[in-house]
Each structure stands twice: as C-alpha cells, then as structure tokens.
Image (cartoon, rainbow, N blue to C red):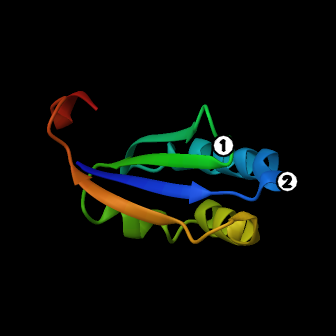
C-alpha cells in the first residue's frame, strides 16, 4: 500500500465549494480498483485546512488516478480555490496490514 496525505489550504470564501468538489472526487475515486481508501478531512480549529488521505493498492495506482476524468475535473475546479499550493507526503503502510484495507 502507498499512503499519500495531500495538504490543502483553501481560501475562506471557497471552503464549501472546495469541500463539495473533494467529496465528489473521493466518491468516484473509491470506484477505482487501485484505491483502497480516500478520505477528506477538514481541520477542526481552522476550517480552511484540509487533508486528503489517499490509500493506494500499488505504487502505480496514483498515476492511474490522475488520468481519470473525475480527478481532472477536481483539479481544474479547485485550482483557484487554494490559498497556497497544495503539497503531499507519501508514506508506507505499517499497520494495519495491507490485506485488511
């Protein structure tokens, strides 16, 4: 498994639109065979900060994800909603075992 945490700071007036776009993308992402989980998290004490938790079944799955129509739609829709460029950090899964995801 490959775990990717994507951190996004959103413009205050666009938080609701960003959240809606992310939920739509996450729902569609879960239909991809290479995606085990796709969570959208919003920081409790600062609603403009989001973290996307993307758990992929293989190292190749993120590239396949970025080729989907729903990802491209999301990327275009949210490009101007960000207060700063998004960034991601990649992790190797330790626990629970990959088979349980």
Residue 16 percent coordinates (x, y): 80, 45
Q: Residue at x 14, y 39 (%)?
A: 94
Q: Residue at x 68, y 41 (%)?
A: 47
Residue 65 percent coordinates (x, y): 46, 62
Q: Does 50 sit left or right of 38 as displayed? A: right
Q: Quadrant of residue 41?
A: top right
Q: Earlier in the sequence, mark 1 or mark 2?
A: 2
Is residue 7 positioned above or below 85 on the image?
A: above
Asked if the residue under mark 2 is in contact with the one under mark 1, i.e. CB atoms within 8 Å, the reply is: no
Q: Residue at x 24, y 53 (%)?
A: 91
Residue 22 percent coordinates (x, y): 65, 49
Judging from the image, what secondary structure is the residue with disc 1 in?
helix
Which residue is more in the foreground, 23 or 79?
Answer: 79
Closer to us: mark 1 or mark 2? 2
- Whole-number angstrom distance, CA of label 1 to CA of label 2: 18 Å
Q: Residue at x 46, y 56 (%)?
A: 6
Is residue 28 positioned above or below 44 on the image?
A: below
Q: Does 4 sit left or right of 40 as displayed? A: left
Q: Quadrant of residue 45?
A: top right
Residue 23 marker: 1
């Amino acid at each position: 498994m490959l775990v990717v945490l994507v951190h996004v700071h959103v413009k205050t007036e666009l938080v609701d639109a960003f959240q809606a776009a992310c939920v739509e993308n996450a729902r569609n992402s879960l239909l991809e065979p290479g995606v085990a989980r796709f969570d959208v998290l919003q920081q409790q004490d600062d609603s403009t900060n989001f973290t996307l938790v993307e758990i992929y079944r293989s190292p190749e799955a993120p590239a396949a994800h970025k080729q989907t129509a729903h990802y491209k739609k999301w990327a275009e829709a949210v490009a101007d909603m960000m207060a700063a460029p998004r960034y991601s950090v990649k992790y190797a899964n330790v626990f629970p075992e990959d088979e349980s995801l």
